[in-house]
Image (spheres, rainbow, N blue to C red):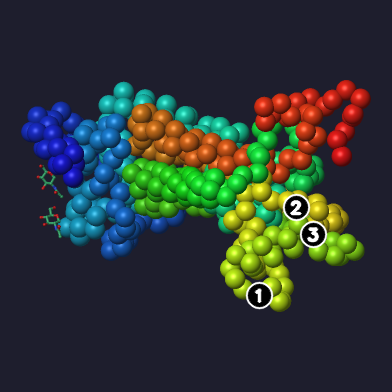
Amino acid sequence: MRLFSLFSLSALVSLGTALGDYEPYEYKNQFELPGGRSNASIDEPVHKPLKFKDFYSDFKTRLDDISTTVCNLSLAAYEGNMTARQALGPVRSYCWTHANCIIATLDERTKASFSGTTILLGLAPTTLSVLGPSVAELALLSIHRPFITLLISLGAPAVFPGRFLQWEDPLRANEPAVGAFLVRPMASPWKWIVLFLQYALAGGAVANVFHAAWRIGTLSIVSWACETSFWPVIWVLLSLIIHLCAILSLRTAITRKTEFGQPRNMEYELSQSVHENGEPNTQRSFPRAWIFISEFTLSADNEWQVSDLYNIRLGPLPVLLQYVGAFLSVLYLVFGTLMFSSLLFIGLSEAVLLIIRMVGSAAICRILVQFEVGGMIRVDERRVYKGIVQAPLEGFGKED
Ligand SMILES: *[C@@H]1O[C@H](CO)[C@@H](O)[C@H](O)[C@H]1NC(C)=O
Ligand SMILES: *[C@@H]1O[C@H](CO)[C@@H](O)[C@H](O)[C@H]1NC(C)=O
Ligand SMILES: *[C@@H]1O[C@H](CO)[C@@H](O)[C@H](O)[C@H]1NC(C)=O
């Protein structure tokens, strides 16, 4: 608050001196040509939250100054002042008219900084996608721990694109790759601490991403939708569709094993938890309780694997779903690039901060997934040194 008043104070101080510095803006060519779409109607409603109220800090003083002095007419018109709208005459968009006025008045240095930012931000989705967890890992994790999978897929917005028309087996995500970290089962106090940390970190990553997306949406302008603020948030949410494709693909590929009955380990877990609750173990209200227990069990403590419980049979549907997911993830990257590179009024330092926040969230989510996947790895103990999987042993070939 104090910071804000400081800014507006400095804006006021500079107003006295700066006023003469700017050429008055003429508001030419702001209306749609005859035969074009249409001019904005004079009583067009004002979309909240209002833009141009607050800018990113890099050029905040200057932008505020321009916005409230030379461009005050279009600012008032944008904010719905009828007198100002009449004075301005017909325009295509009140929001863009004001943005045009600001951009036309800005000095070249600031504009150069904006265009540098555009390139940096445009590369962000692709860069982030390299960092984030892959859909196959998340699909596998979703069977064990659906809720944290949801958090992780929201927290790591950029999706690692699979190869289009190439089947990637989610059940092989936990194969012991050389150099992978193993996560050992944990005893009771640590188990709960780690679980708590997982949810706290995943929740923090989600909050961070959404806050950053909302902030960038409200403080800057997407060039194709000047008045709306929700596009970055939509972009974050859209990643869910891709994860959903991968998860559905895995779900439709697996069928429950019946020949061997229910696996021993799961029954064991179920009975244990029931004992803890002090409830009789009479009826197997199976799936719901099972999901619940599984959600709050670290994968390292989990004694079953998806392949223990399920048979895999690939029909056309699972394969198709994964291909659609891979295709969508490419579209998603293109859309992200389009959106981030059409953001206006963001300075370089703010863009770097934004990218650091996104990278932080993506990295945390990746670490969380890797921790869980590390707990699912089953490997010959002779191949493990200090918790890291080594190259296959001579003479043993593949481990069972
Ligand atoms: C917008 O307004 C201008 C100025 O009044 C007018 O010449 C033009 O035809 C209008 N455009 C459309 C598409 O109606
Ligand atoms: C814009 O600023 C000028 C000069 O300070 C002032 O005369 C004019 O009334 C202002 N217009 C609006 C719409 O506030
Ligand atoms: C609209 O702008 C004019 C100056 O152009 C100002 O005198 C008037 O008070 C404003 N009206 C509102 C409702 O803010």
Which of disc 3 and disc 2 is earlier in sequence?
3
Sooner in the amino-acid sequence: mark 1 or mark 2: 1
Q: Amino acid at mark 1?
A: Pro
Spatial CA span between label 1 and label 3 = 19 Å
* Kind of residue at disc 3: Arg
Residue that appears at 31% across and 62% down:
45
Give coordinates of residue 334: x percent, y percent.
58, 40
Choose top left, top right, bottom left or bottom right for residue 25: top left
Amino acid type at mark 2: Trp
Q: Is residue 164 left or right of residue 157?
A: right
- Quarter of the image holding residue 80? bottom left
Question: Nearest the camera: 331 or 293?
Answer: 293
Q: Which residue is mark 1?
A: 280
The residue indicated by pointer 3 is: 264
Q: Nearer the viewer, residue 351 or 277?
A: 277
Q: Is residue 165 visible?
A: no
Pointer 3: residues within 10 angstroms few (<14), some, or many (20+)?
few
Residue visible at 75% across and 52% down? 304
Q: Is residue 40 left or right of residue 142?
A: left
Q: Residues within 10 Å of mark 2 (few under 14, many from 20)?
A: some
Q: Is residue 273 visible?
A: yes
Give the quarter of the figure containing the C terminus: top right
Q: Relative to residue 33, is residue 180 drawn left or right? A: right
Mark 1–mark 2 contact, CB under 8 Å? no
Which residue has dot 2 on it? 304
Q: Could you tell me which secondary element the residue under label 2 belongs to? A: loop
For label 3, being within 8 Å of ligand 1 is answered: no
The mark lying in front, picked from 1 and 2, is: 1
Q: How many marks?
A: 3
Q: Is residue 280 above or below residue 294?
A: below
Q: Is 97 above or below relative to 20?
A: below
Q: What residue do we see at 58% from left, 68% from top?
A: 277
